[in-house]
Image (tube, rainbow, N blue to C red):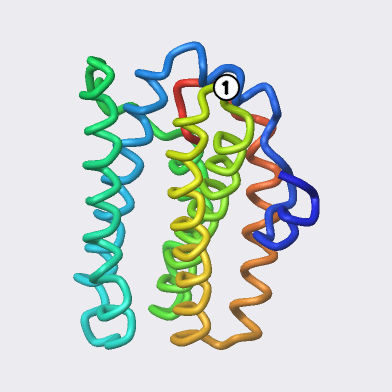
C-alpha cells in the first residue's frame, strides 16, 4: 500500500512487507485467523447494539454489518473446506488486545462509546490495509481476487465507525482522540512479532 493510501486510511505506519511472504507459508493458519477475525467483528457489532440500543442510527447501520461479517466468516470457512484444510482453534489477537488496554475505562458514557467506535475503526483500517497487501502480493491470482473483496468491505466499515463516532460524540473530540489512537497504534505495531499466521 502506498503512503498516500495509508494517509487515506489514517494509518501512520505501513505493515512490514515481509508479512505477506510469511502468510504464504501456511495458508491454513492465516485463513483460520481470518475466519475468527470476521466472527469477532460480528460479535463486536452485536455488543455495540446491545450496549447502545437507544442510538437508532447505530442500531440500524450495524445490524446489516453483523450479517455481512458472519457471511464473511462463512466465505472463509468455505475456502478452508474447499482446500481440504481445517479450521483451527481461535488464537489470542495480541494487536487487538493491546489496543484495548488503551481504552478509557472511566470518564463519561460518551467517552467510552467514542473509544469503542475508534478502536473498531482502527482495526478495520488495519485489516483493510492488510487485505490490500494480500490482494496485490499473493502469488495465487484467485486468492488475490478473494482478498480484494474483503479489502473493499473493510474500507466501508472503517468509514462507518468514524461516521458513527461523529454522530454521537463532539466532532472536535472525535478528531483529537482519533489522532491519539493513530499515534498509539504507531507505537504498538513495531513491538508486535511479525507473524504470518495472524491477520494483525
Provide residue 150's location: percent of width, then percent of height. 44, 48
Provide residue 120's location: percent of width, then percent of height. 45, 59
Q: Looking at the image, which residue is at 48% across and 65% down?
A: 156
Would residue 48 be found to the left or right of residue 1 on screen?
left
Indicate the quadrant containing the N terminus: top left, top right, bottom left or bottom right. top right
Residue with the mark numbered 1 = 139
Q: Nearer the viewer, residue 36 or 77?
A: 77
Provide residue 25's location: percent of width, then percent of height. 50, 11
Q: Nearer the viewer, residue 31 or 47?
A: 31
The quadrant where residue 52 appears: bottom left
Q: Nearer the viewer, residue 18 or 178?
A: 18
Provide residue 140's location: percent of width, then percent of height. 51, 23
Relative to residue 94, is residue 30 depicted above or below? Answer: above
Q: Secondary structure at mark 1?
A: loop
Q: Residues within 10 Å of mark 1 (few under 14, many from 20)?
A: few
The quadrant where residue 60 appears: bottom left
Q: Nearer the viewer, residue 21 or 50?
A: 21
Q: Looking at the image, which residue is at 47% across and 87% down?
A: 167
Q: Looking at the image, which residue is at 63% across and 30% down?
A: 137
Would residue 18 be found to the left or right of residue 90 on screen?
right
Amino acid at each position: 500500500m502506498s503512503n498516500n493510501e495509508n494517509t487515506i486510511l489514517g494509518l501512520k505506519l505501513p505493515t512490514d512487507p515481509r508479512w505477506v511472504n510469511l502468510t504464504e507459508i501456511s495458508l491454513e493458519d492465516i485463513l483460520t485467523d481470518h475466519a475468527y477475525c470476521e466472527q469477532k467483528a460480528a460479535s463486536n457489532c452485536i455488543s455495540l447494539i446491545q450496549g447502545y440500543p437507544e442510538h437508532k442510527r447505530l442500531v440500524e447501520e450495524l445490524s446489516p454489518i453483523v450479517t455481512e461479517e458472519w457471511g464473511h466468516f462463512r466465505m472463509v470457512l468455505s475456502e478452508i473446506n474447499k482446500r481440504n484444510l481445517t479450521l483451527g482453534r481461535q488464537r489470542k489477537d495480541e494487536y487487538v488486545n493491546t489496543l484495548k488496554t488503551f481504552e478509557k475505562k472511566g470518564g463519561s458514557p460518551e467517552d467510552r462509546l467514542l473509544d469503542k467506535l475508534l478502536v473498531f475503526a482502527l482495526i478495520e483500517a488495519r485489516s483493510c490495509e492488510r487485505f490490500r497487501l494480500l490482494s496485490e502480493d499473493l502469488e495465487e491470482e484467485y486468492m488475490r481476487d478473494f482478498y480484494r473483496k474483503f479489502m473493499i468491505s473493510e474500507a466501508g466499515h472503517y468509514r462507518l465507525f468514524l461516521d458513527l463516532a461523529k454522530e454521537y460524540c463532539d466532532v472536535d473530540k472525535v478528531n483529537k482522540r482519533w489522532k491519539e489512537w493513530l499515534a498509539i497504534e504507531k507505537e504498538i505495531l513495531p513491538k508486535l512479532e511479525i507473524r504470518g499466521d495472524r491477520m494483525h
